[in-house]
Amino acid sequence: MSAHGEIFQQMASLLSGKQQMAILGRRKSDWEVMFNTGTGWEFAPGSLRLRVLKEAEAKSEAIVVMDTEKDDRFVDSKPPFRSCLCIPILIPGRLPVMVFAEEPEKIMSFNFNKMPAWEGLVNRLRDHLPEIKSVTSAARKSPEIKKAASPPSLSLAERFSQALKPDGSDEKVEINWRALITVIVLLLGFFAYMVKSFLQSREEDRLRMCSSNLATIATAARMYARDNHGRYPRTLDLLTERKYLENMPRCPASGSMTYTDYVTNSKPPAVTVSCVGGHHRKLFKGSGSPESFPFYSSIEAFEQAKKSKHK
């Protein structure tokens, strides 16, 4: 079995009961199922599955839906499932691949606490995307191509010069050292750029995960209010005590629970919460304070969902 095939099977092992999953790749405007469990994978225009895929691709972040009937982003849809998880795999220059898992009946089957196991497999799968979407050239597999060992008595400059000579030629080849040094400098600059890009991408991934945590907490608080005559929990601890959350999410940038400014209103019903401590200040843009960023408001989320519906 191929490496990516093994990863697919490991992802499938995370499922239970009636849960099912699919690995999808986008080709132009259509999504193609490359691997799946279960049946009924349809992505009709306007369907909830397609809306979740588009939002994950547009925001370049994982989308977790704990309860489709209570999630502000998708309450206007007719869901084929009750809970889902959608994680995009985005590589510059390549069309996106999506990992999509869903539960048809139970709420909260997919939540923040299950994200680390999924993301660990997604990160491994990202390294194997070329195996999935392209065929390795036959030239690379040819056993006839072998590297000739350089004589150990030659210096590095002599080996490089010898490699540039035509076969069987004793003609002396002069090396353009200025051009060689320029190439080395460019390679070092490219390496530094890649390191910087990796660090930037890591910070952005942490911010996206932190934003998802806030949406998860707000959704759990709304579910609590639904079951308690519209009264929101006084503290976030009640969400774990009453099993609306298995564990309280932690900010991935700080490694601790930073969602301490949880506030609710009854008229109109609203939940606001943010990440406290300025752990994402490097990525903060706009008005407000970087010490409380990212910020989540259930009212703003609902208004954004209505605007998206009317577009």
Image: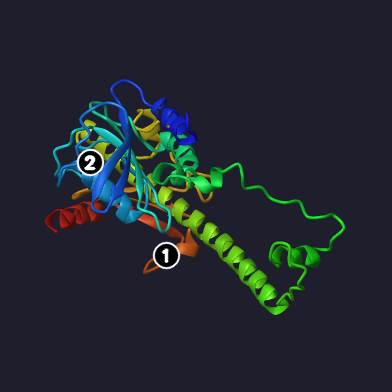
Instruction: Report the residue marked by disc 2.
Output: 49
Q: Characterize the local packing of mark 1: few (<14), some (14-19) or many (20 or more) Cα atoms within 10 angstroms.
A: some
Seen in the picture, residue 92 relative to 103 is either above or below; the reply is below
The front one of 247 and 197 is 197
* Image x and y of residue 148, in percent: 72, 51
Residue 100's quadrant in the figure?
A: top left
- Which residue: 36% across, 69% down? 287
Secondary structure beneath disc 2? helix
Farthest top residue in view: 17
Residue displayed at 53% across by 49% down? 254
Pointer 1 or 2: first along the chain: 2
Question: Could you tell me how far apart the alpha carbons at marks 1 and 2 are, in whole angstroms?
Answer: 35 Å
Q: Which mark is residue 261?
A: none
User: Residue at 35% of width from left, 53% of height from top?
Assistant: 95
Please state if 309 lies on the left or on the right of 236 as rendered: left
**Residue 225 visible in this rendered orientation of the protein:** yes
Q: Which residue is mark 1?
A: 289
Residue that lies at the very extreme toward the right in this rendered image: 153
Q: Residues within 10 Å of mark 2 (few under 14, many from 20)?
A: many
| Residue 72 appears in the rendering | no
Q: Secondary structure at mark 1?
A: loop
Amino acid beneath label 1: Ser
| Front disc: 1 or 2 | 2
Asked whether 219 or 86 is in front, the reply is: 86
Residue 14, percent from left and from top: 41, 27
Tag 2: amino acid = Arg
**Viewer-side residue, 93 vs 287:** 93
Q: Please state the horizontal and vertical placement of residue 141, each as a whole percent of the image.
A: 55, 43
